[in-house]
Amino acid sequence: MASTQARLGQQALALLDVALRVPCIFIIDAIFNSYYDQGSGWVGATGRVLVRVIGVLIFTVVLLLSQKALFKFYTLFLAVLLGLAAVLINYYATSHIDFYSAYYKAALGFRLLPRNGATLWLGMAAVQMIFGIGYVFLLNLQSVFAALVVLDIMIPLWGMMIELPADVRHMIAVVSGLALALNTAVCLAMRLKWFYYSCRYVYLLVRHMYRIYGLQLLLEDTWKRIRFPDVLRVFWLTRVTAQALILVYVGYLFSWDVFWDLTSNLIISGCDSTLTVLGMSAVISSMAHYLGLSILAFIGISFVCVPDVCRLT
């Protein structure tokens, strides 16, 4: 029982490790496939190339981080997203919502909040409170300072509830957003030392492996440590699934008449970069592996694979 739980725990950690590394592959692939404007001058072209190179280097380093460091990186990134969402909600609310007439413009063409003024305010207050608590928890802020941060997020809503003038409400929302942005910048700057030492650890590990074992074993160890084949499989399957949903949404009807056209479009769009070709190859190789095992099991031959030894019995 204990061994089963330990194995399930290891599989869960491996799944989490793969899930945390897949977004880096998506961003690197998007950088490689980004549009290049040839009409811009050499200064603009140089700037775009420099930004792309820096982006690829940063997310390659993030891809190679250890699981613990990668989890902490995404924790900080999620905290930044929560703070940004809270600021955008405050700014949008001060621009488009009138609590007394309960009328507001829907940003995406549909309304998520109720039209009644009191329930609207309570709903927004609950959402902002959740964002504030999540922001404080993820950044691990202390009690008094955490209360001040949550208060800063809630102040623009109070200004709208007591019906301050529009200019004053906009100014309060802007000041609140700037204060939260300043706090986020300070918190991230204080954690730059941790990010530096995490990157330095990866660099020292790679240098040690290269000096002791050579380039081939270094690549093999990195390939296994970050589970790169699994990362590529999840990346390619997720990308193809998203493209299939988009194609079906924009005009394809899921019927057998257009099934092959949809499949052809997915295959073509799924091989438009080096990373997508590697991802498709990883999926095909996995399918071929299990197909081969099925054939061997069907004809009564078992395939035994232990470390350094693989043989037919």
Image (cartoon, helix red, strand yellow):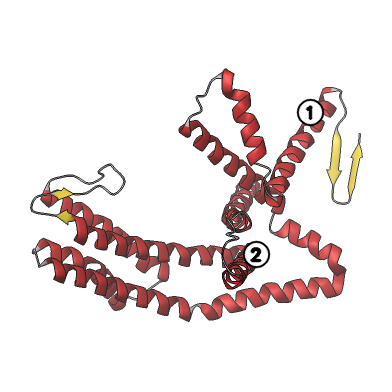
User: Looking at the picture, does residue 30 appear above or below residue 159?
Assistant: above
- Which residue is denoted by mark 1 in the rendering? 294
Closer-to-camera residue (286/32): 32
The quadrant in which the N terminus is found is top right
* Percent position of residue 214, x then y: 86, 69
Q: Is the Cβ of the residue at disc 2 closer than 8 Å to that at disc 1?
A: no
- Answer few, some or many: residues within 10 Å of disc 1's Cα (few below 14, many 20 plus, some between 14 and 19): some
Residue at x 84% of width, y 43% of height = 305
The quadrant in which the C terminus is found is top right
* Percent position of residue 113, x then y: 22, 46
Q: Amino acid at mark 1?
A: Ser
User: Looking at the picture, does residue 239 appear above or below residue 154?
Assistant: above
* Percent position of residue 279, x then y: 69, 46
Q: Amino acid at mark 2?
A: Thr
Q: Name the mark on residue 120.
A: none
Could you tell which of marks 2 and 1 lies nearer the N-terminus?
A: 2
Horizontal placement of 111 versus 115: left or right? right
Q: Secondary structure at mark 1?
A: helix
Q: CA distance from mark 2 to mark 1?
A: 37 Å
User: Looking at the picture, does residue 302 appear above or below residue 279?
Assistant: above
Q: Name the mark on residue 60.
A: 2
Displayed quadrant of residue 109: top left
Closer-to-camera residue (159/214): 159
